[in-house]
Structure formats: C-alpha cells, structure tokens
Image (tube, helix red, strand yellow):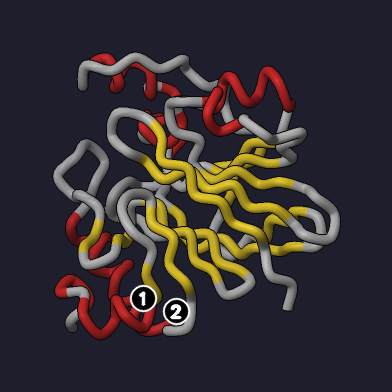
C-alpha cells in the first residue's frame, strides 16, 4: 500500500486542522479543509492539484480563494453543502470573523465516489449530521473526518442544517463499517485511531 505523506496545519481563529496530503510517487498534492490562512498553507508548496472540503462551514473553506488563485486546483465538496458554502463569508461575519468567499466547487461529490491524487485513491463517505453534506475522506489506512468525529467527541449538531438524528445514524454506520485500524485525522484537535474511538469515545457507545 502506498503511504501518503500527511502534514497537519492548524489555521484560523477556530484552530481548524488543514491537511496537506502528498503522493510520494508523483508529488501531487491534495489539500483537505483549507481554513482561513492560505499564506500559511501554501508555504513551501509548489503545487496543489486538488482541494476537498469536508463540509462548507467558513472555518474549513476560508483560505481556499487564495490557494485557487495561485494553484488553480480542482475543488470538491458534497452537493448537499452547496448552500452553506455559498454563504460562508456571510456566516463568518455573523461569528465576528472575516474570510474571502470561495468560488463554487468544481466537482460535487456523492457517497462512494473516488478521488485520485497521483497514485493515491480516496473514497468519499457521506456522513451527515454536523451539516447535510458532511463527508469523511478514507484511503490508504487514513480517515479525514472533518467535523463529524473528533478524538473523544463529535461535531456540533445544534447549528443551522445540523441534525442530531442524522448524526446518530452516521455514528452507528461508522462503528459498524469503518476499519478500527484507520488513523483518524479530525477537523479540530488531536489525531486518533478508529479503534481508540470505538473503545473510548462516549458518543460511539451503542
């Protein structure tokens, strides 16, 4: 199995985890959740081929516009979060923050879709609850979980377009179908493993 090179960059006022995922064979780069600090994200990068948003909240998309201007990557997100993404700058202002509104995504993803980055291939898992279009990105023993699942916790379900009921269904699916050996890279906080979360995360006890 090819082992991706993963760099975690904590960006923005809400301390969002942005992930730079590099194919060791080709040098192609995927950025997952470019939070609001594109200058920090692009430092030392010569190219970005693709961007995936795990959902459309402003703290996960706020640095995208600057990266798109410089690198012209293909941008991707789930179709159910188009509305949230389109209002990202407005929502940021409501929370007292300023971001540059990113353009619409180039490709709309659905559950089960594949995304290739060089010789790497990732599978999209639709995991609604935190938002209608929240996704996890799985591949090569890794799971980028956005704000669906954190180390020891889960994403908020009291926001507009969140759903506690859908989150419960999503978490049951995660426990039943996701490999415990996956390394978990969440949207905020520390990394973990699926096995650790299944054993100890109180929100995954069914």
Q: In front here: 123 or 6?
A: 6
Instruction: For label 1, count other residues whose C-alpha is less than 10 Å away and answer few (under 14), some (14-19) or many (20+).
Output: few
Give the labeled residue for mark 2.
Answer: 178
55 sits left or right of 118 in the view: left
Residue drawn 73% across and 27% down?
A: 71
> Which of the pair 58/184 is nearer the observer?
184
Total labels drawn: 2
Is residue 122 positioned above or below 46 on the image?
A: below
Q: Is residue 25 visible?
A: yes
User: In the image, is residue 105 above or below residue 178?
Assistant: above
Q: Secondary structure at mark 1?
A: helix
What residue is shown at x 20% (from left), y 49% (from top)? 156
Q: How far apart are labels 2 and 1 at the CA level?
A: 8 Å
Q: Position of residue 14 (x, y in %)?
A: 28, 34
In the drawing, does residue 22 fall left or right of residue 102? right
Q: Earlier in the sequence, mark 2 or mark 1?
A: 1
The numbered disc on residue 173 is 1
**Label annotation for residue 198:** none
Whether tag 2 and tag 1 are in contact, CB under 8 A, the answer is yes
Secondary structure of the residue carrying tag 2 is loop
Quarter the N terminus occupies: bottom right
* Residue at image location 54% in from the left, 69% down from the top: 142
The outermost residue toward the right is: 26
Quadrant housing the C terminus: bottom left
Q: Position of residue 160 (x, y in %)?
A: 22, 36
Depth check, mark 2 against mark 1: the one in front is 2
Q: Position of residue 112 (x, y in %)?
A: 59, 65
Q: Residue at x 25, y 85 (%)?
A: 199
Question: In x, y percent, where is residue 50?
Answer: 68, 41
165 horizontally vs 50: left or right: left
Q: Residues within 10 Å of mark 2 (few under 14, many from 20)?
A: some
């Amino acid at each position: 199995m090819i082992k991706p090179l993963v760099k975690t960059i904590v960006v923005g006022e809400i301390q969002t985890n942005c992930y730079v995922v590099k194919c060791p064979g080709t040098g192609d780069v995927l950025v997952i959740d470019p939070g609001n600090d594109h200058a920090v994200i692009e430092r030392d990068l010569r190219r970005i081929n693709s961007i995936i948003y795990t959902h459309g909240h402003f703290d996960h998309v706020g640095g995208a516009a600057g990266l798109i201007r410089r690198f012209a990557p293909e941008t991707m997100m789930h179709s159910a979060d188009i509305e949230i993404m389109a209002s990202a700058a407005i929502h940021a202002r409501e929370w007292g923050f300023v971001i540059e509104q990113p353009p619409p995504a180039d490709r709309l993803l659905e559950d089960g879709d594949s995304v290739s980055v060089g010789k790497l291939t990732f599978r999209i898992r639709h995991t609604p609850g935190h938002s209608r279009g929240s996704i996890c990105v799985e591949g090569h023993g890794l799971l980028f979980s956005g704000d669906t699942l954190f180390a020891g916790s889960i994403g908020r379900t009291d926001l507009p377009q969140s759903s506690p009921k859908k989150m419960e269904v999503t978490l049951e699916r995660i426990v039943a179908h996701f490999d415990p050996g996956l390394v978990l890279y969440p949207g905020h906080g520390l990394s973990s493993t699926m096995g650790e979360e299944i054993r100890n995360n109180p929100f995954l006890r069914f």
